Image (cartoon, rainbow, N blue to C red):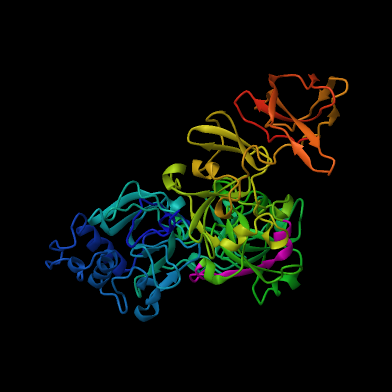
Amino acid sequence: MTRRLSLFLVCLLSMFGLSGGFAGSASAAPADTMAAVSAANVGKGPCSTNSAGGSGFDGSCSVGSWCAVYLKWVWEQAGVSTNGISASAASFITSAGSFGGTVHTDPGYAPQVGDAIVFNYNGAGFADHVGMIEAVHGDGSVDVIHGNINGVVYRINNIPASRARVGANMNTGGLTVGNHAAAPIISAFVTAGGAGGGGGGGGGGGGGLSDGQFVSYQGTVYRIAGGAPIAVASWDNIGGPQPTTPLNDAQWSALRQTPTDGTFVVAYGGSGSGTVFRFAGGAPIAVSSWANVGGTNGQPVTPIDMAAVTHAGQAGVWSHMNNVPTDGTFVVAYGGSGSGTVFRFAGGAPIAVSSWANVGGTNGQPVTPIDMVAVTHAGQAGVWSHMNNRPTDGTFVVAYGGSGSGTVFRFAGGAPIAVSSWANVGGTNGQPVTPIDMVAVTHAGQAGVWSHMNNRPTDGTRLIAAGKSYVVFKGAPYHVGPSKAGVVVDQTALAHAGQSGVWAHLSAAGAATSSEKKLPTKAGKPSQFAVTWTVGKLPLDAKTTTYVLQSRTVTKAKNGKVTYGTAKTWLNGTAKTSGTFTGGPGVTYQFRAQARDKLGNLTAWSGWS
């Protein structure tokens, strides 16, 4: 398994989408100029005559990876500072202080025209690629222009808003840089100094709206919390009717998609009424005690309608609150056992971090303090339901630190199944690949902060590998026929089942998977005697049909030494669970049994007895 699965090589692109909410085009002249200049150079190569009449783009003809110098040149044409920007895509983040830019790492940030998009920043001065937002449409979809895609300046139109957020995975759609294709993850959007932009930040919405203010849009009343509009289903749940401010399309588009991380609300109405929540990754995380989150630190606690919490993550008016935190979100949980542990969300579940070095640092993302009680209750119903206990099936992660660092895993039945090749799992299909700590993988299935990952998939988990269906039984995959519904995993993981290291999260089929009763040892007098057997079950839809029975002789010398004869098949393919064995007079025999199902799966042999 190579690190190339997860580190996507400099200036690799994606045919990607954006998420993060409603965004209108930046009105500032520099941003408009950036869009116009970049559009005028679509299709040009690194040594072409540029739209200003010069050759190439800030030295693009003499560097191998020219995505960064291309965007630097575009920004220069708009008259904004590019101090510190180099041929490194990461320099748009690391030099932002020098050129007066703003780095946006909040998953709720809505990108603006002219924003740089930095992919796969590792926190240590390296990023894979940088592109630029050319246009933002009314539905939040965007057009993006990149340098150095298929060797030219390349535009991709109408990328859906659902994939324009920090942490989103960008599908390449077959586009390449050199001999490589990639599916990069957005690490940050960067707004040039004086270019406009905006978005991430706390406490207020667009157009001067403040937390607690009531607004209306297209017939629905909302209350602003953390800069985002939270729907109100009933005035009774927030103390009765209040004055509201109607919003036009532009004002609505200026609001955040979800509340700023760290925002506190208290929800009233229905079950759990009066519960305080703190937002992390756009989702409401319940607070059992102010002591576990250090108090409000002066932040407002905005009363909202509990209906918005129970409908979190649904479409339409309820879409301004995630059901579970965005993948990649960092939190630190206080209170009780493990207090102070940092977690990173993957597949909606909190994955413990033992060392910042193993996750590349925060890359500027907020680390939101939350209540550890919410972590210990993850996956439970009611107010605790906004955090999964274990990652959603199909979630991709890449784990760093220690042996196997850089391995990609896909979750199935709550367990991490190693991926040796993207081709074997059909690519990421636009899902994020979240960097996590390998220590969490090696501690999978243990108690406490490590309990949010199974060591092996839950029994009954369905897998698909190389077009075949499998059901997990006692940690092992059993073939149950042609492809059905299930999690697509790498067939290499099945072939390595039962091995150590990154492959340790599947048991080998037929190895210590059955619970056979020991068969009785019988002395051979008389020469015939009854034998019964019971063998552990196979998966329910791979029903046991036949058994194999073996016998062997047992000889005990006067000095106590025991000698066993060669195992011989006594019965092969019987459907019975008892039989009459004929042996030699005075000879002692032992027996063992094995079950076979109609698809050829075998249990382990029972012990000799």
Residue 344 included in the magenta stretch of the image: no
Residue 373 included in the magenta stretch of the image: yes
Left-right relation of 266 to 395: right
Task: Please tell me which residue lies in front, 171 or 479.
Answer: 479
Residue furthest right as drawn: 525
For the point 70% across and 55% down, the residue is: 378
Residue 577 image position (x, y, % from top left) = 78, 22
Left-right relation of 432 to 566: left
Residue 276 visible in the current orientation: no
As drawn, 40 above or below 191: above
- Quarter of the rendering containing residue 193: bottom left
Residue 19 image position (x, y, % from top left) = 46, 55
Residue 46 visible in the current orientation: yes
Residue furthest bottom as drawn: 98
Residue 584 image position (x, y, % from top left) = 80, 22
Task: Please tell me which residue lies in front, 423 or 516.
Answer: 516
Q: How many marks?
A: 0
For the point 71% across and 66% down, the residue is: 371
Residue 277 image position (x, y, % from top left) = 68, 62
Looking at the rendered image, the quarter that the C terminus falls into is: top right
Q: Which residues are magenta?
A: 360-377
Left-right relation of 246 to 29: right
For the point 18% across and 68% down, the residue is: 62
As drawn, 447 above or below 195: above
As drawn, 166 above or below 156: below
